[in-house]
Image: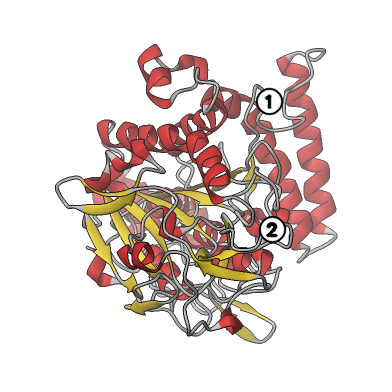
Amino acid sequence: MSIDEFTNAGGDAFHQESLREGLRGRRDFLRDLSHGLGGIALASLLRRDGLLRAEEPSAGARGVATHHAPKARRVIQIFLAGGLSHVDSFDYKPELEKWHGRTPGDIDKAQLFGGNYGPLHRSHFPFQRRGDSGQWMSDLFPHINDLADELTFIRSMVSLSADHAPATYVAHTGFREAGFPAMGAWLSYGLGNETDDLPEFVVIPDSRGLPDGGASNWSSGFLPARHQGVPFRNGPRPVKDLAATKLLTEEAQAARYSLLAEMNRRHLADRPGEDALSARIRGYELAARMQSSVPEATELGRESRATHALYGTGRKECADFARSCLMARRLLERGVRFVQLWSGGRLGAREAWDAHEHVPSNHAGNAVRIDRPVAALLRDLKQRGLLDDTLVLFSTEFGRTPITQTDKSEKEGQLGLGRNHNPGGFSIWMAGAGLRPGLSYGGTDALGFKAIENPVTPPDFHATILHLLGIDHTRLTFHHGGIDRRLTNVSGRVLHELW
């Protein structure tokens, strides 16, 4: 275009003068860039890396910027499906020694699950004070005990259900019913990812089976489908059907992808607003990139012998979970926002922490699978400088009763060795992300039935996690069914006392 043509087309005096002189200053260049495609790309990159603060998003808009300075950039959650017994792990109750074998006079059976209630039973594992902080912890997790001064305990968690599936949904979505977005999906929606080659939300289930409720526990619910959790299996092929065929050259494969992308664009253009279709197309595109990124991220052979020894990948009793923990650390290093590790598969068996029949064998068998790997994960994150901005969660859906669960086959007068579900009070711990290490927050009554000191609800827990990641839980919303939905529903208190 000539200068005269540009002038006739409506160019302003500044651009006319710039063209005449053939000179452009740095400020002029940057000003023009901010109005073009380069500026859009730059803004996208800055926002993705958290360097550009967005305006307050309207209800339902994706708020990819944090609301305040975050303490954490990423989360790893170890979830013990089935119900870890707090009175046998992290909640020392000397009164149980005193009242062992006796039946308490006042039990709120309405909050408990099922029937066949027996007498009180002392802890099945001895308790000791651990670390300089003097945390009371049982012998159930000897390797985790060595890191007592790194942990921040909440000993007053409560659940909203005494049944596994609803309680597990509550723990992850804040609601008893299936169909609501999991916390990992909310974080994917709110913060996005730090990489374009791996999913935002990765789930590593227990290799022995899926938890109660299955994939509903990592669903995106009513959020866009792209935010759902992506399961990675423990083994040489973490993602099914990911590997590219060996029969095609790279050029032929690229040509096929290009043709498929064009067909998808046309298909989507004819069906505007189809979120599931859009998510599926994006999933295919991500899968293509994952063909190279996943093998690299999950290739544990790249780790040193010392690292493998630390995690215990060569130990029969814990090799399976050790590989999962090591894979999780590699995924976090490569920009995955939320990694969830599940311990516990099929309920009513030794594969889950559902110790109705025999707490000692159930809990000891499951603990030895995860104790060394979890402790190694914490040590590894710390020595790599990742623990400072990584939030580690160690949680379960509810606790277990201090009274036994009896069985008709047991002899009269014989104490049962199982415990039933207890949503009234239980313990979890957190680590990293600027939390106060060695802190114990809240507490249950003298026997461990109910949280009586600073009870913490699931919305409180979720609000605190979001806050640590720089998100105001009341402002991360999605408009659905005429309601501005949020992870914490209509409640939730940030536990500022934890840091």
Residue 425 seen in this snapshot: yes
Name the residue carrying label 1: 237
- The one of 251 and 391 positioned closer to us in this rendering: 391
Q: Image height check: is 5 above or below 206?
A: below
- The one of 364 and 26 positioned closer to us in this rendering: 364
Q: At 72% from the left edge and 29% from the top edge, which residue is drawn?
A: 242
- The one of 385 and 150 positioned closer to us in this rendering: 150
Residue 472, image x, y percentages = 38, 73
User: Which amino acid lies under the numbered mark 2 shown in the image of this protein?
Assistant: Ala
Q: Distance of mark 1 from mark 2, alpha carbons?
A: 24 Å
Q: At 76% from the left edge and 40% from the top edge, which residue is drawn?
A: 261
Residue 332, image x, y percentages = 44, 39
Name the residue carrying label 2: 225
Specify the quadrant of the image occupied by residue 66.
Answer: bottom left
Circle 2 Cα neighbour tier, 10 Å, few/some/many (<14 / 14–19 / ≥20): many
Residue 272, image x, y percentages = 78, 64
Q: What element carries label 2?
A: helix
Query: Which quarter of the rendering shows the C terminus?
Result: bottom left
Q: What element carries label 1?
A: loop
Residue 159, image x, y percentages = 52, 72
Residue 16 seen in this snapshot: no
Q: Is residue 88 left or right of residue 357?
A: left
Q: At 34% from the left edge and 73% from the top edge, which residue is drawn?
A: 446
The tag earlier along the polypeptide, 1 or 2, is 2
Circle 1 Cα neighbour tier, 10 Å, few/some/many (<14 / 14–19 / ≥20): some
Q: Is residue 42 left or right of residue 323?
A: left
